[in-house]
């Protein structure tokens, strides 16, 4: 096991209720080092944290380790429980959280309406910010 795997494993095992279920796999690809973290389904929330704060902190620590080792680390948190959403959190510059929710969803028409109203609201707020003289 490499130092980066041990590092992530140590931190995550300190956070979770089921430390024996923590698995960190390491793959080297064209983007750098990909660390895949698998935890017990009950501990997924603890690893991700509210609004992804804990995962962001882990990502920041990995970035510091990468600076020391001249490497770029990506962290992927995998949920192996099909009853919950599947999250992938990467340490790329743009954070992506992708979910596959098995619960009942809105119809496609409702999703489009919600997205368009959110987009309209966001555009309006951005336009108001552009009007400010700073």
Image (spheres, helix red, strand yellow):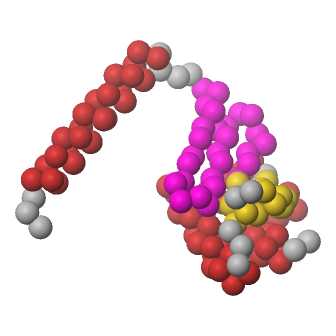
Q: Is residue 19 above or below residue 76?
A: below
Indicate the quadrant containing the N terminus: top left, top right, bottom left or bottom right.
bottom right
Examine the structure image and report whether residue 98 is included in the region drawn in magenta. yes
Of 40 and 61, nearer the camera is: 61
Q: Is residue 4 above or below residue 32?
A: below
Could you tell me which residue is drawn at 78 percent across and 42 percent down? 80
Could you tell me which residue is drawn at 21 percent across and 48 percent down? 126
Indicate the quadrant containing the C terminus: top left, top right, bottom left or bottom right.
bottom left
How many dots with numbers?
0
State which quadrant residue 15 falls in.
bottom right
Could you tell me which residue is drawn at 81 percent across and 60 percent down? 28
Of 54 and 28, nearer the camera is: 28
State which quadrant residue 74 falls in.
bottom right
Examine the structure image and report whether residue 120 is included in the region drawn in magenta. no
Could you tell me which residue is drawn at 63 percent across and 53 percent down? 89
User: Residue 30, image x and y in percent?
Assistant: 74, 57
User: Residue 56, image x and y in percent?
Assistant: 56, 64
**What residue span does the magenta drawing correspond to?**
77-103
Q: Is residue 43 above or below residue 6?
A: above
State which quadrant residue 5 falls in.
bottom right
Of 106 and 66, nearer the camera is: 66
Q: From this viewpoint, is residue 115 visible?
A: yes
User: Residue 118, image x and y in percent?
Assistant: 31, 35
For the stretch drawn in magenta, what is the main secondary structure? loop
* Left or right position of 15 against 116: right
């Amino acid at each position: 096991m490499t130092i980066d795997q041990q590092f992530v494993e140590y931190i995550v095992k300190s956070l979770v209720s089921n430390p024996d279920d923590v698995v960190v796999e390491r793959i080297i690809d064209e983007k750098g080092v990909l660390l895949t973290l698998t935890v017990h389904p009950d501990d997924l929330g603890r690893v991700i944290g509210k609004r992804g704060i804990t995962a962001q902190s882990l990502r920041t620590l990995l970035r510091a380790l990468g600076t020391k080792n001249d490497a770029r680390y990506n962290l992927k948190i995998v949920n192996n429980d099909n009853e919950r959403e599947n999250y992938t959190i990467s340490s790329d510059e743009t954070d992506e959280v992708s979910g596959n929710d098995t619960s009942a969803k809105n119809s496609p028409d409702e999703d489009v309406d919600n997205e368009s109203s959110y987009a309209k609201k966001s555009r309006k707020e951005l336009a108001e910010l552009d009007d400010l003289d700073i």
